[in-house]
Image (spheres, coloured by chain):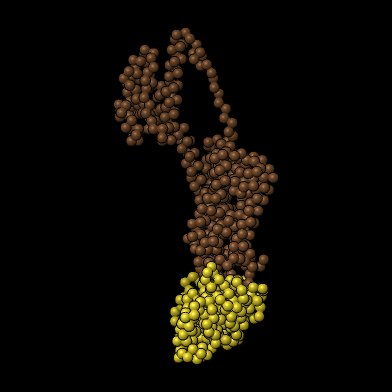
Amino acid sequence: MRALLTVFAKEFLENLRDRRTLLSALLFGPLFGPILFGAMVSRMLNQSVVESDEPLQMTIAGSEHAPGLVRYLESQSVRLKFASLSERGAREAVRSGTAKVILVVPLEYGARLAAALPAPLLLVADSADSQTRKSADRARMLLGAYGSGIAQLRLQIRGVSPLLAVPVAVNEIDVATPTGRAVVVLGFMTYFVLFAVLMGGLYLAIDTTAGERERGSLEALLSLPVARGSLVGGKILATCTYMCLSLAISLTAFVFVFRFVPLERLGMSANLGVGTALAFFAICLPFVPLGAALMTFVASFTHSYREAQTYLTSVLLVPTLPIAFASIYSLKTNSSLMFIPSLSQHLLMTSVLKDEPVALFDVVASAGSSSVFALILITLTARHWRRETMLG
Amino acid sequence: MIEAQALCKRFGTVDAANDVSFAARDGEITGLLGPNGAGKSTCLRMLYGVLTPDSGSARINGIDIRGETSAARAHLGVLPHAAGLYHNLTARENIAYFGSLQGMGRVQLRRRTAELALALGMEDFIDRRVKGFSQGQRIKVALARALVHDPGNLVLDEPTNGLDVMAIRSLREMLHTLRAQGRCILFSSHVMQEVAVLCDRVVIIGHGRVLADGTPRVIRERSGAQTLEEAFLHVLGDAEGVS
């Protein structure tokens, strides 16, 4: 136990003095998620909020054939830009991006409208562009409303009740709670949290194994009268400590970011205060030794920093697999999934985020299964360290 | 006292050590001499217990390294072929790390480190980080690390490899001092001159077998050669002939 603590203290101190470890474990790793997340979400929110507030901009060609339509659009505070464009010219203009949405009024519009025949209008927009698609949707809605207004007037003039033309009245009820809707947006946040956990230990797992070998200090260490299990234990414990630090920094940053992201402007409430962050920390804690043992185990087989880095980058992706699998098959939270590490943490964090009740059994199953896997990996690592091939 | 008794080790089809027996005595410097790939490192690694022999045994002060590894290692200092240090730690911390893993207390460590710093001339850089040390400074720290628990026996695997003349000179002086203290020193080398200058006894190894064992003078006389180098080539040549 004394040897284990000696190894732990040395690895902790040595890596504290290593700029590369500090940057990746305590800066890039934990802050990557929150910053990227904050930037993405606030950009998404700003866009949609801004778009529905701003008046619709539309270019209209051949407006002289439809003075009524122009008056209607202006009354709906659409910002009209008048141009004289042919159909082809309009296509070109949209394709080249000089105009987003163009409404072309053909020559025969007036005559056909007067004759109560369907009057053609041409709406040119690019649906592949998510920005203009929204503008085009709004334009389509306005034009539809204009058309049904005229239809109702025509029926009234002919002494027919306009209600006959409205056979069904559809009312929509959206049951997504504000928090629930936010969870869709926040779903991938849990991966960032697990990513921060692993990044915190990545360089330590490499430095304490492949690094030891590359520096040539391994053989001297192995020839000391210390049980190999104590060496492995101390190294993994140091890795775990950095992972916990990284997790704490990451969660703090998330709490901070959530204060500034205007989620409530979209009617979403994100439930990430200090309490939730503490719950996240507790949920992720059993995942820490598992990740540390997995990375140390893999890195123990490598001979250089570079080789270890190559393998461990794929290890960083391992926790995404169960999460991706679960979302592809849209698995609902159930107790048997709680035995799968990373997925169980993801599900528990999502539940906490949604303010759903969390079953004690699920928490215990998640922590227990992760700990069992961690113990197996630690044992395997120690066994590998006892082999002669460890000398390389 | 370090004893090898009929040590055998095979890697696949290669006999790295084949019935290797010799003894290194206290108060003497014993040189394990052999060309590259002769099995010197394999023998030393079995002696300090990081490799398990297929058969045979190794004893440190009479204690079996396989049976009572920790007890045997307590009497043994090791400077392996790759004696890398931790660059982000100071010389003192490097030494203290190994001392602590040898089970030494803080007070004991401080006293011992001061002794070693004085004996090896490390006072100027003992509290500096190892990053940027010269080869001579590194070998001193590595040696101090191997000697921190004051072992009676010291094993060095090609300690002069890659060292410049000055560093080799100071290493030689340090080994002489350690011998004068009555320690048993066993080191391997493929450089003839080094062994001739340093050693009281020479064990020549080739193809995993002991080809000659004795003082440099006895080996010279036995093979009828003028210099140790000639004797070495003679002994090796015989071995080539039989194998």
Residue in the foreground of this view, choosing between A259 and B48:
B48
Residue beneath the point at 50% across and 66% down: A214
Q: Quadrant of residue A137?
A: top left
Query: Is any atom of residue B107 visible in this view?
Result: no
Pick whichever, A201 or B67, lies toward us: B67
Instruction: In the displayed orientation, state which residue is furthest to the right.
Output: A360
Percent position (x, y) of residue A205? 55, 60
- Whether A217 is drawn above or below A177: the answer is below
Q: Quadrant of the N terminus of chain A?
A: bottom right
Question: Can residue A161 be seen in the rendering of this structure?
Answer: yes
Q: Position of residue A135 (x, y in %)?
A: 42, 31
Residue A125 picture quarter = top left
Seen in the picture, residue A129 relative to B34 is either above or below; the reply is above
Q: Is residue A136 left or right of residue B188?
A: left
Residue A305 versus residue B219 in the image, above or below? above
Q: Which chain is yellow?
A: B
Q: Position of residue B205 (x, y in %)?
A: 52, 80
Say which colour chain A has.
Answer: brown
Q: What residue sits 57% from the left and 53% below the top?
A: A197
Q: Identify which residue, A95 or A278, lies in the foreground.
A: A95
Residue found 49% across the figure and 15% down from its top: A165
Q: Is residue A203 above or below residue A180?
A: below
Residue A372 picture location, percent across and down: 65, 53
User: Which residue is located at x 47 percent, y 81 percent?
Assistant: B241
* Circle count: 0
Seen in the image, is B133 located left or right of residue B51? left
